[in-house]
Amino acid sequence: MITSRRKKYCDYYDEAGFECQTAQDDHGEAQDFAAMMRVDAQCIRCDEPAGWKGQGRPRRYCSNRCKQADYRSRRAWTAQAA
């Protein structure tokens, strides 16, 4: 339950109802899962660890070589389809 107009969250222990505690727990679990997915990201092309520098989006490719090979295979596939 939000008690003031400026307050955008409810305190977990003070005045929170069960719904608020559950929502905060779900949000925390989602953040932990997203962080784990960033750290464990794998290359789309070769399934090697893609790496993550700690900020921003996780990498999709482990190297420029895999990125270029994937681009070329997608381009060849669309050329065959046309």
Image (cartoon, grey):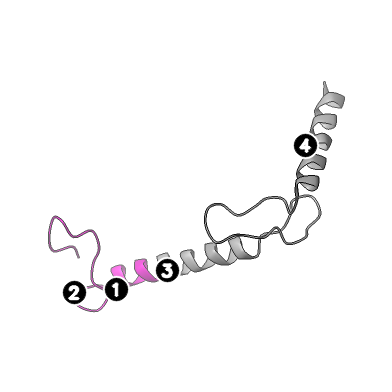
Which dot, 4 or 2, sits closer to the camera?
Answer: 4
Report the side of 11 relative to 61 (left or right).
left
Q: Say which residue label 4 marks.
A: 71
Q: Say which residue label 3 marks.
A: 28
Of the numbered discs 4 and 2, the one sitting upstream in the chain is 2
53 lies above or below 29: above
- Image point 19% across, 77% down: which residue? 14
Classify mark 4: helix, strand or loop: helix
Report the side of 39 relative to 47 (left or right).
left
Q: Residue furthest left?
A: 4
Report the amino acid beneath label 1: Phe
Whether 10 is among the magenta residues is yes
Classify mark 3: helix, strand or loop: helix
Q: Position of residue 16 (x, y in %)?
A: 23, 73
Of the numbered discs 4 and 1, the one sitting upstream in the chain is 1
Report the amino acid beneath label 3: Gly
Which dot, 2 or 1, sits closer to the camera?
Answer: 2
Q: Say which residue label 1 marks.
A: 18
What segment carries the magenta color? 1-25
Q: How far apart are marks 2 and 1 (CA)?
A: 10 Å
Report the amino acid beneath label 2: Glu
Of the numbered discs 2 and 3, the one sitting upstream in the chain is 2
Of the numbered discs 1 and 3, the one sitting upstream in the chain is 1
On the image, which quarter does residue 28 sit in?
bottom left
Q: Where is residue 22 in the image (x, y as percent from the top left)?
A: 36, 70
Q: How far apart are marks 4 and 1 (CA)?
A: 49 Å
Q: Say which residue label 2 marks.
A: 15
- Image point 32% across, 72% down: which residue? 21
Classify mark 2: helix, strand or loop: loop
Report the amino acid beneath label 4: Tyr
Dot 2 alpha-carbon crowd within 10 angstroms: few under 14, some 14 to 19, many 20 or more: few
